[in-house]
Image (spheres, coloured by chain):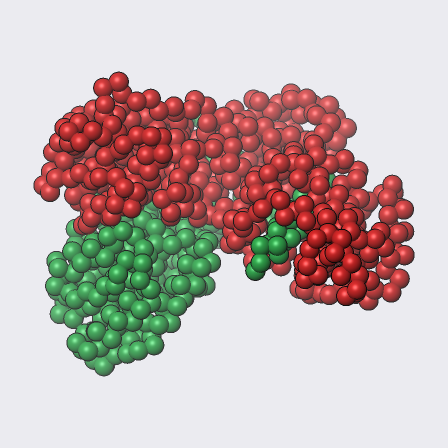
Amino acid sequence: MFETLTDRFEAAFTKLRGRGRLSADDVDETLTEIRVALLEADVNLDVVTNLTARIRERAVGEELSRALNPAQQVVKIVLSELTTSLGGERLSLTYASKPPTVVLLAGLQGTGKTTNAAKLAQWFLRQGRSPLLVGADLQRPAAVEQLRTLGGRVGVPVFSHSRSPVKAASASLAEATRTGRDVVIVDTAGRLAIDAEMMDQVRRISKAVKPHYTFLVVDATVGQDAVSSARAFHDSLALDGVILTKLDGDARGGAALSVKEVVGRPIAFASVGEKLDDFEPFHPDRLASRILGMGDVETLIDKAESAFEADEAEQTATRLLEGTFTLDDFLSTMQQVLGMGNLRSLIGMMPGVPRELRSADIDEGRIGRITGMIHSMTPAERADPDIIDASRRQRIAAGSGCRPGDVKSLIDQFKQMRSMMKGLGGLGGKRSSAGSRARPAKQSGRSKQKAGAQRRGGGRTTPKGPKPVSKAPLALPGLEKGDWPGFN
Amino acid sequence: MTPAVVVVLVVVAAVVLVAVVVVVARRRRRSRADAGGGGAVGQLADRVIDRVAERDPGTAAEASPSLRDRLGKARAALAGSLASAFEKPSISEDSWTEVTEALIRADVGLSVSSEIVGAARARVAAGSDESAQAVAALQAELRERLSGFDRSLARRDDGRRPSVWLFVGVNGTGKTTTIGKLAKRESDRGALVVLAAGDTFRAAAADQLAMWAERSSAHIVRGAEGADPASVVFDAVESAAARRADLVLADTAGRFHTSQNLMSELQKVRRVAEKGSGVVTETLLVLDATTGQNGLAQARQFTEAVNVTGVVLTKLDGSAKGGIVVSVQTELGVPVKLVGVGEGVADLVPFDESEFVDALFA
């Protein structure tokens, strides 16, 4: 299993602490890891070479910032270099003064051209346009049927011609004018870049419709070959942009970097799921961290660092791992988390969070009720929720305008989380499977311990020496790992 | 789950994770030794990349449309990258780097490439391989690793229960097309074939399969769009049994191995296929030759879920080499059984490790 670059860099940089700048030697040590990471993410070998050269240039001599350690700093540089490479100029679609605006989709077989033609049509619809889909894939059996079905689903007419893809494409322009459609999206057959005959056909289609935009549809799972096929398509068709598909799997999508480097045109859209709605303008920063296998953790850390007092957060986290986390801690952490921004977007940045949770319907208003419940508890209850019996529950429910059941579920969830976290804290070397399921241990003397822990707050909280922290803490314990694409 | 509980859960998750993230960010002091042997691989990557840097980038992978057969074209695409390694009279450090580089470019992957090159070097050093060239030594090593698999497609020929071949894979790898070609091939060989249009998700997937059924004069059983794929496959098996057909080729919708629900659905399809009169004798994972390192994850997850018995490597007629199947075969023990080298019916051929290895280095 791949681990994030930061993990890998830490060791290389431990001896660096206390120095002011990154030296060439320091950077070279990490470049190896960067290369490995990029190659494992399917970035093309030549592209890796160019990229690492650029990263080296940028990183050497960089002043070390106080807030970040050197490893994080290099990761930041790598991320920003990748983001720049992937992003740069944005494609802003303009519409032809004399409609229709013609969009041509091309690519290898099975990259998702037909599906994305429909997704694009829906996107144009939402921009207030009236698109026409053109089925120019007469190669694959039932490709036009597929397009018609999808067109029906999004409410966009589909035009085709039974014999010739070139004729279908050229006749579609008149059809669009006749029926008042102002955008024409031409779906072509999948073809191999080295198939001269088929490449000639798509060139003829292109000549016939004179597209305003030609998009290459690229599959995020593609490996080293991405470069040669993208180059061939670019040479034949002069691409204007790229649509990156199949980001719903866990492929890192390094191919996007390769394609971007070769074609030099922006990645305009990303297809992130099977539903026709799962189509959005491309975010270079997200893909950059995905390529490095790190979710958006770095952004998350940035946000967390700005929202939390570092020392306080560390104490809280220590209590969490020791199992002495209280409802007061919970409340204050929750408020700080809310200060970091939209809850759902935060969850989206965390690696290892399962889809169910990520797509859960989060009504932030309900968080107010949780706050209310905790506020209705006495300090003793907050410190030790185990003392909350039925009659206390009644009182808390009455005080916060909830039902006793709500109070119970909050406390149950809280305790469950606390014991999960405690199990995690004890992970260290051995990974006890009991950790996540263990009930809180006997409660006697617990609150005293806790008070002590709180009073000791100012002391050393980071254990001395190297403490192996498993990758597991980055995933939500107790929930299935591996079903959140792209971040494992 | 009530909404309130969901909210609590979500908040708890958020709180916990943010706290952990902060702590982890501060505590990470992982030693390099723990990184899992990244060192040697890393050095190799360095060497490979240093060499690439010396050359003009971009000259390596130019497609040449002039060669006769399609595989020939594909092979020519990378010819330049190894020419020098072939020319050298003896093996130098550079030639090892070059062959590693060729493996990486063929999507074999960094760690597997370095492992294989290491083994080839050891062979040469131990004198057990007489090859005077790195390429030859490596080819021998690869062939050996890839040989010894049973690549036949299993069938029960007792004429009573139809054999079911189930096709699985991520979206767009060519499952339906592969089934179409196989239907034609098996029908031509005299088998009575029934196609199960188990892809009830993708628009017109059943229509696509129906056209192949027509071409190969196979029967097809299809359900409504959005129907339960397991029931379609079950019906197809029953219909095959009633017709005394030999073989059911069951299509399934493309799905990502990361989607738990869809993988469970697939497990159900496999179970239900054997509920009636059929026996699943092959579960074939269709892998696209252009797939990069994600291919291994795909193969691993599909194998775990539905016990894949073989791989169909499609689209090998392009410039992509399909090197990921080296890992799939050596790490998961799942052999490639068929290779797709074109769009024609005849372009589905048995896998041959020697040809594949040659093409990898062509």
Q: Nearer the viewer, residue A421 or B77?
A: A421
User: Which quarter of the figure has residue B100?
Assistant: top left
The picture places residue A293, in percent across and down from the top left corner, at 54, 42
Indicate the position of residue A488 as horizontal and vertical percent values.
54, 49
Q: In this view, does B250 lie above or below B291?
A: below
| Vertical comparison of B305 with A203: above or below | below
Percent x, y for residue A52?
52, 29
Q: Quadrant of residue A298?
A: top right
Q: Residue at x 38, y 54 (%)?
A: B255
Please give left or right for residue A36 compared with residue A430 in the image. left
Q: Is residue B67 visible?
A: no
Residue A98 shows in this picture: yes
Q: The red chain is which one?
A: A
- When the figure is inspected, residue B43 is found, relative to residue A180, above or below; the finding is below
Observer-nearest of A216 and A14: A216
**Chain B drawn in what color?**
green
Q: Where is residue B180 in the image (x, y as percent from the top left)?
A: 20, 58
Name the residue nearer the viewer: A382 or A133.
A382
Q: Which residue is drawn at 82% across and 56% down?
A: A381
Q: Quadrant of residue A94?
A: top left
Report the front residue among A419 and B324: A419
| Residue shown at 40% from the left, 66% from the top | B267
Numbered-mark total: 0
* Left or right for B46, reference B91: right
Q: Residue furthest left?
A: A163
The reply, left or right, for residue B337 in relation to residue A325 is: left
Q: Residue at x 41, y 59 (%)?
A: B262
